[in-house]
Amino acid sequence: MPAVIIRNLSEETHRALKARAAEHGRSTEAEIREILETAVKPEQRIRMGEALAEIGRRLGLTDEEMSRFEPDKTPAEPISFE
């Protein structure tokens, strides 16, 4: 598992992280992990497909027209080198 080292962290910030971790009943390391995960993976993440479908609906595309954009779930044929 990857590790990250944070250098030059002020004592004030370190104390604040320790206090915040204690409030949440976690170690300082677990608290930092939680902060980073929340920052890079927000709950309201926009998914490209959903955003494009919403644009299509706003433009007035019908259900039939929208169905053309459904993914093809047919399994791919393996490559034959013969």
Image (tube, helix red, strand yellow):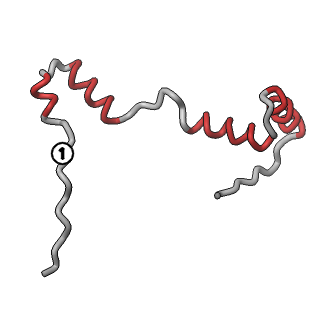
Q: Which residue is situated farthest in the left direction here? A: 64
- Residue 73, how many percent across, how many down? 20, 46
* Quadrant of the image occupied by residue 63: top left
Nearer the observer, 13 or 20: 20
* Quadrant of the image occupied by residue 14: top right
Q: Badge 1 is on which residue?
A: 72
Quadrant location of the N terminus?
bottom right
Where disc 1 sits, the SS reads loop
Query: Does 19 sit left or right of 80 as displayed?
Result: right
From what the image shows, is residue 68 above or below residue 7?
Answer: above
Residue sitting at x 12%, y 81%: 82
- Residue 46, how many percent across, how many down? 41, 31
Query: Does 29 sit left or right of 69 as displayed?
Result: right
* Quadrant of the image occupied by residue 5: bottom right
Q: Amino acid at mark 1?
A: Asp
Nearer the observer, 55 or 18: 18
- Dot 1 surroundings within 10 Å: few (below 14), some, or many (20 or more)? few
